[in-house]
Structure formats: C-alpha cells, structure tokens
Image: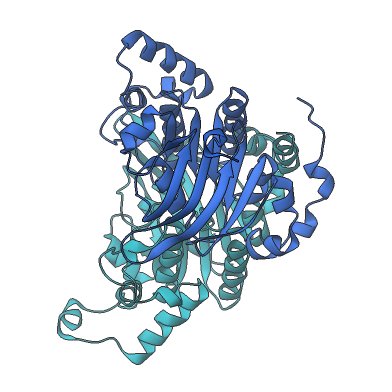
Amino acid sequence: MPESTAFLRFEGVVAGYGGGDVIKGVNFDVPQGGVTCIVGPNGSGKSTLLKTVSGLIRPRLGQLWFKGTSLVGLTPREILQLGIVQVPQNHSLFKEMTVQQNVELGAFLVKDKKVIAQRLEHVTEIFPIVAERAKDKAGSLSGGQQRLVEFARCLMLEPELVVLDEPSMGLDPKTLRLVFHTIKLMNKAGRTVLLVEQNARQALRMSSYAVVLENGQLRLSGSGAEVLNNPEIGALYLGGSIEETPKAVVSTPSEL
Amino acid sequence: MTTLLEAKDVSRSFGGVKALAGCSLSVDKGSITGLIGPNGSGKTTLFNVITGYVKPDAGTVSFAGHDVTNARPNKIFALGVGRTFQLTRIFARISVLENMLVATQRDESWLRGLTRSKSSKSELDAAMEWLDFVGLSRLASLQAGSLSYGQRKLLELAYVLVADPDVILLDEPAGGVNLTLINEISEKIRALNKDGKTFLIVEHNMEFVMKICDRVTVMHQGCDLVTGTPDEVRNNPAVLDAYLGVSDEEVDEEVSNA
C-alpha cells in the first residue's frame, strides 16, 4: 500500500527513553474507521508506542505516517491540529481547576466560544458527570470519575483518531460498560480508535483489528477475533482461559 | 472468626462532598475481604482513613485491639497494616531493588535506619524473591521511574508483600495488569492467605473479586450498602442497581455485539 492511502502507518519504528530501545522496529497499519487494539504484557512497549503517535516521544528510527503526512518531528500540538487526540494512562486533569474548566481546556485550539459551548453540551450528553460536577475541583473526584472527565475532554477537539491508553482502568463495571459503549459510539460517528487495553477479552471483541506487542516487537496481528482465539496468545496474555470463551460469542450477530 | 480490622461509622467530607457518610467495615482475621462499589463511592477514602492518610470527621478505626483512629500512617504501617495505592507511589529516582529494601525496614527505629549502611542478606533475598514473583527481577537494577505503569503497580504489590504486614490492603491490584498475571497474583494471594495473611481488596475486576474473596462489602455513596458472600452480593438487587448495572453475562454479550 502506498503511504498516501494508509490512515496511520508505523514503519520500522524504534523508540525509547534514552536508556535503550523500548520499541524495536514496529510495522503495521491502523485501518481507517475501525477500532484497533494493542495487546501485550506489562512493559512490552504499548504505552511507548502510543506516545510516538501523539508526539510525546520522537522515534529514534523509522517513520509514522498519518494520511500521508509524517508525524516524526511534529510537536504534540501540531499532531493535535491534525486531528489525533490521546487520553493518557495516568491521571492528567488539573486537580485545582474545576471539572468544566478541565473539559473546556480540551478545546484549547478552538477560538470560537460558541463552538466550545456547543461541544461542551454535546459531551455532557455522553458524560453527565461533566454537568453534575461542573463547579467541583477535578481533584475532589474519585479516580474513575476523573477518567470520565478525561474522555469528555478528549472529545472537545472532535478528533479523527482517538488514542486511548487503557480506557477501562479503574472503572466500575457500570462505568466500564458506558465507556466501551462510548468508544463504540465515537467509532460509529466516524472516529478511528487506537487503544491499549488490559481488559483484553472485552476490548478484542469490539476491535476490528488487533496487534500483539511483545518485548517491543510485533508478535501477531489480525482481526480482534483472530487474536482473541489464538491459543498461544490466550495462554500468555489473556488469562489462559481463552478456551472458556465460546467462539460463538465472537460472531454473535449484532442486535443493534 | 475474630475481627482484625474494623471501621465504625466513619464519616469524612472534602469541601462540600461527603466522601464517607457513616461507613462501617469489618475484616475478619484470616479472611480475604473484597470492597467494591461504584466510582466515587468512597472506597479509596476509606482505605486512606484506615491507613492514617486521611483523618475521619467522625467514627473510629481499630486494628488488632488498638484504636488507630487518628494514628499516623507510619505507626499504622509498623503495627502491621500494609497497603498499595490506586495511583502508584514509588521512589522514582532509586532502583527497583532499592525500593524493595526500603519496604523491608518497616519496624526499624530511626536510629538504626540512620546508622546502618547495608541491607542484610535475608532482606536482599526476600526482596528478590518478591520481585521475581511479580516478574520484575530482571529489572531490579533499573531506576524505578523507568517502569511502565503496569510494572509500577507490580512493584508496589511486591513492595507491600515484602514488608510482611498482617493485613494487606490492595487498591485495584488487577488494574492495568495483564490477565495471565492477574491469575497468578490471585493464586499467590490465596497461598498467602492460607499462611494466615488477611487481605482487604478494592477491585473492579469482578471475576477476580468473586474468585478469591470470602466476603464482600459493597459501598454506595459513602456508606456500606451490603455485606455478604460473593454470591449473595452478586445476586443482590441493590448491588445490581448501584454497581453492576446488569449481570456480567449481559455485559459480555453487549460488548461482543459491538
């Protein structure tokens, strides 16, 4: 595939933090319009790989193409302007600012106050907590509640590619359902999703494409169902109980 | 069974938000007690009150017959209550192994801590053993700050285990950890429990909670809503309503239909 047609392409990406390479030559394409999931053990380089997309670290070697534009060397702000927004893994809200201020900051590239207000209204429909706790300091929210506000904030730029680092972490079952549902909605509304998730079985079921990362290299790639049903991957990273997951579940026709 | 750790009618507000509103919890000696509840129901605040990081506005906390209601964190730790944090707290600028060695010194006087220069062989061995258990032994000499988030969680788990407390409070031990390792961790918790360790675990991974806990307390809006066996709790309508929303099977089905 020529580079111009790939939505997001990793091409021989090598990256790390100075103390050796964490990502050791990764090649794959993230298809447009889908949900792509990166699976792998702790420390395999999943978060590092996401940081190369959002520009938080610069690959030492290799290339990253977003719709034909090279992302290597761009600042995180320039990458945001291209339509790529990442929700980081660690809690990243400004704790002394209110919930609403935090969410509005997500639209810092937008100057039109009317547009900001409209988008705020829109994300509030998906995340009611933004209105319920609008005037509370973000630091007074629980861990899971802060997570929701972070998602709300990321939607304020109406990104084309949403990069999520373990979106389900710290969420109660009800909220987790809401978040996975929201990811589906975002995807249906045309946003491509690239995510890292340790809640891998559920994430893979809703992924159109998945890659397994091991020690900084690609071990396997395929559809979410293929990776989910790969016996070796199941034993290594999915709790070894993959046999218990009936295959029928994967191909259940949509009732939606 | 005797009660080892007990919080009674604990309340605590932050500004206008009532994080705890008369919450009670008791942990039997030798049990694995689960603490679940929606985001914002006060689980972590209760942990913070029990371990002395937050002072309650009202209510009492007792551990093994001691009133520890307003005791400092280091005193509660020295008495034998160890904990991990939802957001990891490690010393980022020292090595992984050095982090572990700090934890081995829980009941040491400040004078000994000042004068000694080395850790003993048995402390080193214990530190390496627990690092090995969580799969971090090959990273022992790395700066702890270079670990990934999941690895930091694992270091914290090893860190609290090496300190050998009587009761171990774990705040979301399965969060951000890969599924195979979660299973290994739950096996290890069970083995430690057989050797007499008591656990209090906050966790959203229901499979994990249902598999290893003897008793589960469900919190809702700063109060304890229900306490019972995992099965009793899972089938309790109030819990379904406040926490689970729908049963696990329905969630699985819904997600698979994505």
Residue B160 point in image, percent of width and height: 41, 69
Residue at the extreme front: A2
Question: Is A145 placed left or right of B213 in the picture?
Answer: left
In the picture, the quarter occupied by the C terminus of chain A is top right
What residue is drawn where x is 50% and y is 27%? A160
Left or right: residue B111 compared with residue A153: left
Q: Is residue A230 visible?
A: yes
Direction from residue A256 to residue A167 in the image, left or right: left
**Total number of numbered discs in the rendering:** 0
**Position above or below: B183 against A70:** below
Q: Which residue is at 65% across, 43% downward?
A: A209
**Residue at the farthest right position:** A248
Q: Which chain is cyan?
A: B
At 67% across and 59% down in the image, what residue appears? B211
Q: Position of residue B63 (x, y in %)?
A: 41, 64
Where the N terminus of chain A falls, by quadrant?
Answer: top right
Q: Nearer the viewer, residue B248 or A230?
A: A230
Which of A26 and B83 lies nearest the eye of the viewer? A26
Seen in the picture, residue A138 relative to A30 is either above or below; the reply is above
